[in-house]
Image: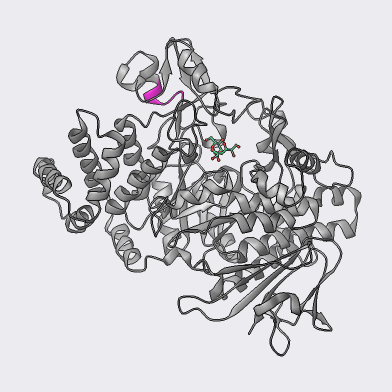
Amino acid sequence: MYEQVAHSLLNDILNRIKPEICQQDLRHFYTRLGANFYAIHSLFEKLYGERDDFEQQMLSLVETMAKRYIQRSDELRQRDLQREKDHNWFLSQKWVGMALYCKGFADDLPGLRGRLNYFQELGVNLIHVMPIMPCPEGSSDGGYAVSDFQKIDPRIGTLQNLNDLAGEMRQREILLVLDVVVNHTSNRHYWAEQARSGNPVYQDYYYTFTTRSVPDMFEQSMPEIFPENAPGNFTWDEEMGRWVMTVFNDYQWDLNYSNPAVFIEMLNIILFWANQGADILRLDAVAFLWKKIGSTCQNEREAHLILQVLKDCCQVTAPGVLFIAEAIVAPGEVSKYFGEDAVIAKECEIAYNATLMALLWDAVATKNTRLLNQGIRSLPIKLERATWLNYVRCHDDIGLGFDDRDILHADYHPLEHRKFLIDYFTGRFAESHARGLPFGQNHKTGDARISGSLASLVGLEYALELGDERAIDDAIKLILLLHSLIMSFGGIPLLYYGDALGTLNDDSYRDDPEKKGDTRWVHRPAIDWQKAARRNTPGSIEYKIFSALKRMIAVRKEIAVFADFNNRELLDVQNPHLFVFGRYPLHHQQGHVLVVANFNRKPQHLAFDDLGTWKPRHGRPVDLYKGESPDIFNRSLVIPGFSFYWLEVS
Ligand code: OTU
């Protein structure tokens, strides 16, 4: 859009931009800058327009974008151009991801490169390598307390190792996802060290206070994220002689985005990792980016504005790079991270579907889908050119982030139901086979989240201890049932490393003084590659899980309607143990696929007449996963216990 003020400022900036920048071939950069400048300027002005140095900040912003564009390789620039043409490329059903700790999966980056065949064997073509930047020993928060944003932890490798890995992944058409921890830094980061030494420029990179009056005001409305290990949201730093905001651990200092210098620093870092070959950047804890007295300091409008400017700037310099919003927040808030009111995503193209994840676990515990159906019904429609990251487990805890209204609608009492779920997954509930651990227990609110590996939470650990073959079989079926839903729901399915092998909890973290206070380490294993080799031994548990997932992934990739074009219809069937939805063709797709999932151990039936327009018209529908007809009796589907169908219906 042409607008005089913005345009005259752009002309002024381009006249003042450093000569060494102007001599470069910036054709595509200028075209994109011109197209996006009005949005960038108006959003940046909303955030920082009242400052006297606003124009200087705008110049610094444009120079940052230009410098990173100049550094961007021709290969990555070519990729940008291809993706500008095929701008829905990431909505395809061809993508299947896996999140992993490099150290836990393959020791280091060269090791990870050496194991790329494993991903292709399974059919995974997107790898989220969790944070690899340097963190202080013993205060790393699993990589999320970064002390240098433009280096790699030497124990994991070098920038050259990463570039070699990224290059080989491109050749194999595997996407690389990297983390940028945008909300905070380690208290050992250069900026924090400068702030600690009294440098006011860097003290203004954080929220620091000489007295408790402002912190106490904030504490009135801010929840505690880590109530056990880091109660409260502020930490006293003796050397600095000031309180500093620390929403997460006390060694993670929250960045002050009301300071444009912080915004520009983080944009520079985002574009640095884009230039290292990341196809997608996972922006950590984006819900927390803007702090406001009297609020929870989550999901503030300015947090969305910050993401919109980051996205607009990244589209100028590296348009082929996507953002993942890591916002584990209330269901009604999550989809806003695609973009608040744009027709297409203008913040993050991808967001963690934490709502689906929590609802699936509810169905595992209750063996019914009342809350799952209600919660999905209430999920806001997602914007076009945006997609979910659908996952069952990740490196973090399971938060029971349902909406209380949905819990009530499902005929449960919110407080009691949450307590039941925590008791169920931590094995305190009598009939539970789950071996989860509580995380983040808040004795003031009774709230807690859950740690534990997928296999241990669904009862495989329990079943193996007892040598109970039936229970082992049930646990394996549940693992496959959960994966069948993240593969068919609509969005990119993200497996967690080890789950394809039935990896159990790893209690060794209890012997590590740096980890024993954080139960999330129970599900951050080191892969046992001897166990992994059993994936090729027919009859083994690893074989049963791995080969089924391998098939599921291969079949998913051939089902065009599994691409995510908001083409899903939830069916309200009478049976409360079933989760049923249809995927229908849009945008020259073909076929209709009915997904039917049974969360009860006992077989369930579903009358064709319950399926409305999805009723199989003639002949017998085919289950695309098994490649055969499902069990049908007298115009009713029979769904075996803990099983699913992907039915092709005409
Ligand atoms: C994220 O976590 C990371 O995924 C966690 O591993 C980090 O500990 C945390 O940020 C701090 O960097 O930010 O959007 O409930 O699931 O804090 C929510 C604990 C987050 C994490 C939650 C989450």
The residue that appears at 56% across and 32% down in the rendered structure is 141
Which quadrant of the view contains residue 522? top right
**Could you tell me which quadrant the N terminus lies in?**
bottom left
The residue that appears at 83% across and 65% down in the rendered structure is 641
Depicted 331 relative to depicted 596: above or below: above
Expressed as whole percent of the image width and height from the top left, the position of residue 549 reads 67, 65
Q: Identify the magenta region.
A: 187-192
Depicted 163 relative to depicted 220: above or below: below
Q: Is residue 249 left or right of residue 210?
A: right
Expressed as whole percent of the image width and height from the top left, the position of residue 565 reads 49, 68
Expressed as whole percent of the image width and height from the top left, the position of residue 634 reads 84, 84
The residue that appears at 50% across and 22% down in the rendered structure is 218
* Extreme residue in the bottom direction: 619
The mark tally for this picture is 0
Which quadrant of the view contains residue 45? top left
Expressed as whole percent of the image width and height from the top left, the position of residue 69 reads 25, 50
In the depicted view, which residue is nearer to us: 412 or 65?
412
**Could you tell me which quadrant the C terminus lies in?**
bottom right
In the depicted view, which residue is nearer to us: 55 or 138?
55
Magenta span contains residue 619 = no
The quarter of the rendering in which ligand 1 is drawn is top right
Q: Is residue 341 left or right of residue 11?
A: right
Magenta span contains residue 191 = yes
Q: Is residue 381 left or right of residue 609?
A: left
Q: Is residue 588 visible?
A: yes
Rendering colour mode: one colour
In the depicted view, which residue is nearer to us: 353 or 439?
353
Depicted 306 relative to depicted 141: above or below: below
Q: Is residue 248 left or right of residue 534?
A: left
In the depicted view, which residue is nearer to us: 188 or 162?
188
